Image: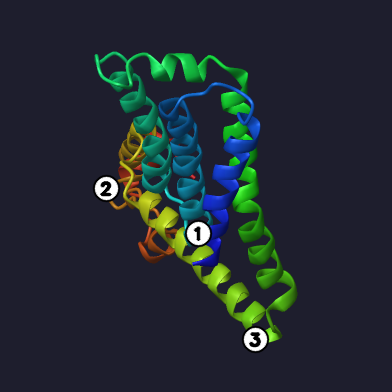
Amino acid sequence: MLNAVWASLAIFFTTYLTYRDTEIGIWEFGTIMNTAMVVVVNVQLAMVSKNITWLNGLVLVGSVLAMFVFMFVFAVVPTELYYVAFVTVSDCRYWFIVLLASWLALFPQLVGQYLWQNELSGPLDRLRAKERTEHETRHDKERFQNAVAREPLPMATIDQSEKKKEVYGAEYPAYSRTPSALMSVPITLSSTSLASNGGV
């Protein structure tokens, strides 16, 4: 609750103090605040997310991009917002306010999250975080190994296996991904293969 109040005050007063002695209209003022608000909300969502996948990143970045798309769409519609976005975005102060207001709004949360994770947390909390990280790393490794195991066999490996079957006989084991499978199948040399290779 306090974090939301602080973010609102930071965005509003940063915009207000920057345009205090200018003739900015209410629609330009609201466009700037809306942009900063969308940026802050999406960054906060990223900060509280346990894991950032490609889908999470796509949604977060897509939210910001969608805001700009709709802002420019409404700018070409003959309403009160007509051409407001183009005029507002062309001013360098717009980008300065968005960056500064976003940083001020997120600063307390950044500091609080750092202190909680590094200074205020006890040994048990740090141990749990370490075990959780190790579990996630092990889980990712297992997923990667399972994905590799499902890959199709290379044609070059299959061709080599077939050639060795012709030389050493039909008992030559087929291609296996595990060395134990190769060791468990006996390899015998037929008399035909010995004769074809000049004998022993």
Q: Which x, y percent locates residue 177?
A: 39, 53
Q: Would you say residue 195 is visible in this rendering? A: no
Residue type highlighted by circle 3: Leu
Mark 3 residue crowding within 10 angstroms, few (<14) / some (14–19) / many (20+): few
Relative to residue 73, is residue 104 drawn left or right?
Answer: right
Viewer-nearest of discs 1 and 2: 1
Name the residue located 64 percent from the left edge and 26 percent from the top edge. 21
- Quarter of the rendering containing residue 123: bottom right
**Viewer-nearest residue: 91 or 180:** 91
Dot 2 corresponds to which residue?
A: 170
Q: Would you say residue 103 is visible in this rendering? A: yes
- Quarter of the rendering containing residue 112: bottom right
Q: Which x, y percent locates residue 4?
A: 50, 59
Dot 1 corresponds to which residue?
A: 4
Secondary structure category for the residue under label 1: helix
Real-space Cα separation, disc 1 to disc 2, in angstroms: 73 Å
Dot 3 corresponds to which residue?
A: 124
Mark 2 residue crowding within 10 angstroms, few (<14) / some (14–19) / many (20+): some
